[in-house]
């Protein structure tokens, strides 16, 4: 194996800036998409458990569509196909005037995709609440909305914190797909450094180390959250 | 709104079919390789031999914290360098997928192995079976059986993941669709068609998982 090691390349100003900027984009895409995903995922997940059949059908369809099409294809549809399918004025606006189109598209695509996965967790969380509790709520004269607000949601959101940790990690990894529509996030920048300098080993190692650090920090944050939200005696470690 | 022209799909069908075959082949080989390597990793983690368990755990956690695209770039760069000659995009991609998916399969197999009751292992030991015989005849067959639905689900995810070979221009279904989309100038039709094909395959797969689950529950 002939290879000229040169770790110094990572600290040359130009390439270091590339890495920092890539890191910034990865974090901003992932966190923005996560916000969309939590809001829509919660709504859709709740929608899958309500008594109304039409709402349940719509939410189930949403989950099936977004889960069964690869994220890459969704990314391309949002970026290339949606502007063509909208009325002409809107399409022109998306192609010409939308600020930061790659970033916005990546956030929307990743957010809506992740929402379908979060929706499944939310639904599962609501379904693990013992049926006696909602029966008790009904017996107390609570309406359906009140039952969700005061009984089902507070419990289920605390139950699903651990499974959400892995979704939270996944959103950072999946943000790398933004490079396919031209956003220079961390993976794209490391690839670019590899191409410019022929120091692939160093460039990819740098990206790998940064991703591992992101995963560690995200895991620690979620564990802190888990500690504060754990319901005593409800979802213990051995449960 | 542009006029749709779905003839472009019809005329490029043979080309797309070649791409889909490559996607399916890559999926199949990666599932097999991933399960074999994943099972070995799971056995290493549960072996009780500390260095082995630590190495396997480090590998799994490392792979699980980096994106697949980065792993694909790694192996496109590393494999030719390590072998001293290029071996073609398909094999580089295959190696990347097997090594990547093995980490996920090993977590599934670990759960599967742990779902087999300890008494089964003890019974195997008292009948005089060796460690490998116990794994081969007692533990793994039951672990596989318990995990079949999750293994299939992971297979569906893997099939979706193969679309990422797009980043190295390997001609799978996704890359083929995108080539047709660009050369014919029919982005909308081609990407919607690609979405439909992936949807039909993955949705059928998840229906299969559902029926497997209900059959196992009874």
Image: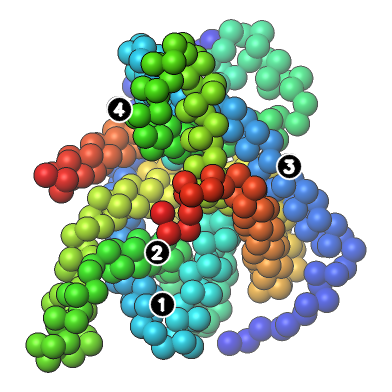
Q: Which residue is found at the position 26% from the left and 57% from the top?
A: B147
Nearest to viewer (mark 1 / mark 4)? 1
Most extreme residue toward the front is: A140
Label at residue A28: 3
Q: What element carries label 1?
A: helix
* Distance between mark 1 and mark 2 Cα atoms: 10 Å
* Distance between mark 3 and mark 2 Cα atoms: 29 Å
Is residue A48 shown to the viewer in this render? Answer: no
* Distance between mark 4 and mark 2 Cα atoms: 42 Å
> Position of B11 compared to B133: left or right?
right
Residues tagged by mark 4 and mark 2 found on one chain of the structure = yes
Q: Which residue is found at the position 13% from the left and 88% from the top?
A: B126
* Distance between mark 4 and mark 3 Cα atoms: 41 Å
The chain containing the residue under callout 2 comes to: B
Label at residue B107: 2
Residue located beneath label 1 in the image: B45
Residue located beneath label 4 in the image: B10
Viewer-closest of B22 and A222? A222
């Amino acid at each position: 194996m002939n290879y000229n090691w040169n770790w110094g390349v990572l600290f040359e100003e130009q390439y270091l800036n590339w890495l920092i900027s890539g890191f910034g984009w990865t974090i901003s895409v992932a966190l923005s998409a996560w916000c969309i995903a939590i809001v829509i995922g919660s709504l859709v997940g709740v929608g899958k458990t309500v008594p109304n059949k039409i709402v349940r059908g719509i939410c189930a369809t949403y989950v099936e569509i977004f889960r069964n099409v690869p994220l890459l294809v969704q990314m391309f549809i949002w970026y290339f196909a949606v502007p063509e399918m909208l009325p002409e004025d809107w399409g022109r606006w998306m192609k010409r005037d939308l600020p930061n189109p790659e970033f916005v598209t990546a956030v929307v695509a990743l957010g809506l995709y992740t929402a379908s996965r979060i929706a499944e967790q939310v639904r599962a969380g609501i379904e693990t609440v013992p049926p006696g509790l909602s029966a008790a709520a009904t017996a107390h004269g609570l309406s359906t909305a009140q039952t969700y607000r005061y009984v089902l949601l507070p419990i289920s959101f605390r139950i699903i914190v651990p499974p959400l940790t892995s979704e939270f990690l996944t959103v950072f990894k999946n943000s790398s797909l933004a490079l396919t529509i031209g956003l220079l996030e961390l993976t794209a920048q490391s690839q670019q450094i590899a191409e410019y300098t022929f120091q692939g080993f160093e460039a990819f190692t740098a990206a790998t180390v940064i991703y591992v650090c992101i995963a560690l920090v995200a895991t620690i944050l979620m564990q802190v959250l888990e500690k504060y939200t754990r319901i005593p005696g409800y979802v213990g470690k051995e449960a | 709104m542009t006029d749709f022209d779905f003839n472009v799909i019809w005329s490029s069908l043979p080309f797309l079919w070649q791409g889909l075959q490559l996607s399916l082949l890559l999926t199949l080989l990666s599932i097999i390789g991933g399960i074999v390597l994943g099972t070995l990793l799971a056995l290493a983690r549960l072996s009780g031999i500390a260095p082995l368990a630590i190495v396997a755990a480090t590998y799994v956690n490392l792979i699980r914290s980096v994106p697949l695209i980065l792993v694909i770039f790694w192996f496109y760069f590393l494999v030719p360098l390590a072998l001293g000659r290029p071996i073609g995009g398909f094999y580089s991609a295959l190696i990347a997928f097997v090594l990547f998916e093995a980490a996920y399969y090993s977590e599934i197999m670990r759960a599967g192995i742990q779902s087999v009751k300890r008494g089964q292992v003890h019974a195997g030991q008292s009948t005089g079976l060796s460690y490998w015989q116990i794994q081969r005849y007692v533990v793994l067959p039951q672990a596989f059986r318990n995990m079949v639905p999750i293994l299939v689900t992971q297979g569906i995810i893997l099939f979706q993941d193969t679309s990422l070979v797009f980043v190295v221009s390997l001609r799978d279904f996704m890359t083929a669709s995108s080539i047709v989309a660009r050369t014919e100038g029919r982005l909308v039709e081609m990407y919607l068609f690609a979405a439909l094909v992936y949807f039909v395959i993955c949705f059928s797969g998840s229906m299969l998982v559902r029926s497997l689950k209900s059959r196992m529950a009874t």
